[in-house]
Image: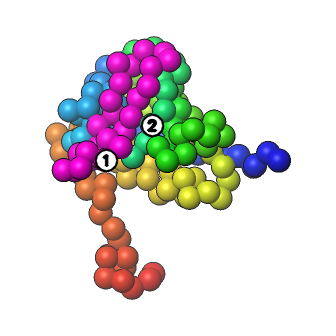
């Protein structure tokens, strides 16, 4: 039985260059500054990549494969929970499309092939907006935002 799939598309505009946006996604030392994780790969089609939390344990939170690389305008990767990596059906796909737009960049992140209603899909829906906001902040101001921050209502245990 095939499970229903869903996708999310996020578009943001960043005062930067396509080269700097591409580097921010693919260079671990930059990604950790806005994401709290490092994206580690040699960024060649067919190569593995992993998303490593920059905590003491260096927890691998996500794994996948590089599907397509066209620096500085496009990157496509697969995406899965490491505990489910042996199941081909557990993988989703993320496409980063980066294009010059007047004096800025339009970054379109498409996360598709997600199982509808899954924990991963719900996490993606909440996660990408804050990660992309932090990326934008870092590239425009030199400082990312706390992607692990919780709304005050959650932090205090009060539901909104």
Q: Position of residue 11 (x, y in %)?
A: 49, 40
Tell me if I can see residue 148 in this picture: yes
Task: Give the residue displayed 48% in from the left and 15% down from the top.
Answer: 45
Q: Check residue 131 for magenta coloring.
A: no
Task: Give the residue displayed 37% in from the left and 79% down from the top.
Answer: 153
Q: Is residue 80 above or below residue 66?
A: below
Which residue position holds label 2?
A: 63
Count residues near mark 1 (Cα–Cα under 10 Å), then give few for <14, some for 14-19, many for 20+. few
Between residue 2 and residue 71, name the one nearer to us: 2
Q: Which residues are magenta?
A: 34-60
Q: Is residue 42 above or below residue 55?
A: above
In whole angstroms, how far apart are the C-alphas of marks 2 and 1?
11 Å
Quarter of the picture containing the C terminus is bottom left
Between residue 16 and residue 109, name the one nearer to us: 109
Q: Indicate which disc residue 59 carries.
A: 1
Local SS, label 1: loop
Tell me if I can see residue 110 in this picture: no
Local SS, label 2: strand
């Amino acid at each position: 039985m095939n499970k229903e799939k869903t996708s999310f598309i996020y578009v943001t505009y960043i005062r930067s260059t396509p080269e700097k946006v591409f580097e921010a996604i693919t260079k671990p030392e930059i990604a950790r500054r806005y994401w709290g994780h490092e994206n580690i790969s040699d960024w060649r089609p067919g190569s593995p990549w992993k998303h490593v939390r920059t905590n003491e344990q260096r927890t691998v939170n996500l794994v996948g494969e590089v599907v397509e690389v066209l620096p500085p305008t496009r990157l496509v990767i697969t995406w899965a929970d490491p505990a489910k990596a042996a199941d081909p059906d557990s993988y989703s796909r993320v496409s980063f499309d980066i294009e010059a737009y007047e004096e800025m960049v339009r970054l379109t992140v498409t996360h598709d092939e997600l199982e509808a209603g899954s924990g991963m899909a719900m996490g993606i829906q909440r996660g990408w907006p804050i990660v992309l906001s932090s990326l934008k902040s870092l590239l425009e101001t030199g400082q990312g935002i706390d992607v692990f921050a919780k709304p005050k209502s959650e932090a205090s245990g009060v539901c909104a």
